[in-house]
Image (cartoon, grey):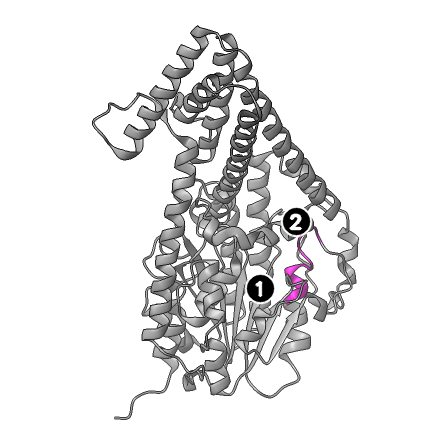
Amino acid sequence: MLRLFVTFAILNALLLGLEIPRHAGFGPNWVALEALVLAGLFALIPPGRWSRGLASVAASLLALLSLVALADALARMSLGRSLNLYLDYPLIRSVYHLMAGSVSIPGTIAAGIALLLVVIGLALFVRWLLGSLPMQRSPTALAAGGAMLVVGIAGATAFHVGTALPSLPRAITPGATLVLDQLRFGRIAHIERREFEALLTREPDTGGGTPLPGLDGIDVIIGFIESYGVSALFDDRYAPILGERLEEMERDVAAAGLHMVSGTLNAPVFGGQSWLAHASLLTGLQVRNQMHYEFLLDTQRASLVQDFQKTGHRTVAVMPAITRPWPEGRWYGYDEIHEATDIPYAGPPFNWVTMPDQFTWWHFEHSLRRGDDRPLFAKLALISSHAPWVPILPVIDDWDEIGDGRVFLQWEGGGETPESLWRNHDRVREHYALSVAYALETAGRYAARFTDPQTLLILVGDHQPAPLITGANASPGVPVHVISGDPELLEPFRARGFVPGGRPPSEHTDIGMDRLRGWLQEAFGAQPAQ
């Protein structure tokens, strides 16, 4: 009897642990009905090869469910949503590269091996635990096991089927619920994919693009600022730091004779997967998940790249975070794509960040923007405000000192390690704010120094950071700052709710960043004949 109840207690704790991601800790429930079923079943079956095989299967399933729960916790912490295996399995590679860049390849491999050993150890322990029950077959234990089995099956039936059987208080089926959730999420994702496919079918696109004659001769530059969400401006933990930086940007812009308006747009993602935000803004479609993205890449579809090519612009993408082959980039049809290995940076990387934003802006202005008489459309993916948010570099006052980036060698190895910083979540949040402040300061100084009446500069956050930074139920909004020396270029944004200065009017909006392409077409596209 003691062995039976100890086994039940251990299984109960392990199964209730599957609920930790959902509740951000142990939830309000006390009994996992599957633990009753397993303990009761193995108390009744006779010992032998069949029981050992069944114990191996049950232990393997519990270990697998634990892995899924761990992945669910990671998805909730990083992406602000539940895990969806149907959509998220391709992200395993991205998680590996993020950890390798933030920590180290040996550290990442060691962590993976340690996780594998823990899972194997859990499976072996549960297999031994279940396999030991049939060895003690006292009449009392058999009766207790039978009662557990009946109550567990009846309770699970009442919980899921809704029969006339009464539900046990604070009793749940965490394992079955986890599996059913993934089946439901997969079904919803499949329906959304069909809807996305239908949308593309209803709105056929030859890939030719729509010219924007109102921007003929204007350099249009879109700078995506990593992890720059509205929480940076409206959360009291970050607003003092970022508010001061925006005020400085306003002063610099005004002193340079420029004009700025700001607003809010909703990003399609939280915490990561920046490429989905880029795709949404460029194509004018809500690309909400990896499946949408991959299906989009299998179609012929125009984006702002083709719109500006039709207008006579040279089109350029600057992607300092791309360190591996990026065949998806060719789908957009840029005239030039400059990945990390194409950019002649002679300074050091800073953890995941291959090069600081200030160098990216400098290289773009002096090596890519100049030397061609055609107007330019450029997308820059700026990465200094990407996790792990350490070290925080100072902004170099004299941009002419930047050169090939060797000036940044003086900060190589500076600051603390990510492993040290991330032990204290309050300090992580502080570093997040400081890293975004750095990104805004470099962007603002670039604007003041290199923007003129023939330039339309759009600075936009790619997505909100992880819930660790924003807290629960944060807005999906990202700030958008539009800067130019020609105030007429800003009028279409004013007409759509943008306000003068650097602070958006609200952290909430119903408008997604996919609307930006349509706005540009409406405001600067060919006007109908009168």
In this picture, which residue range is highlighted in magenta? Answer: 350-360
152 left or right, relative to 365: left
User: Which secondary structure dominates the residues rendered in magenta?
Assistant: loop
Whether residue 300 can be seen here? yes
Determine which residue is flagged by label 2: 392
Q: Is residue 391 above or below residue 206?
A: above
Q: Is residue 317 rendered magenta in the image?
A: no
| Residue 296 x/y as whole percent | 46, 69
Determine which residue is flagged by label 1: 381
> Which three-letter amino acid code belongs to the residue tagged 2?
Ile
Label whose residue precedes the other's in the sequence (2 or 1): 1
Camera-nearest residue between 205 and 191: 191
Q: Residue furthest bottom?
A: 530
Camera-near label (2 vs 1) is 1
Q: Residue at x 38, y 41 (%)?
A: 180
| Residue 272 x/y as whole percent | 52, 53
Quarter of the image where one finds residue 264: bottom left
Q: Is residue 355 rendered magenta in the image?
A: yes
| Residue 313 x/y as whole percent | 53, 84
Q: Secondary structure at mark 2?
A: loop
Mark-to-mark CA distance, 2 and 1: 18 Å
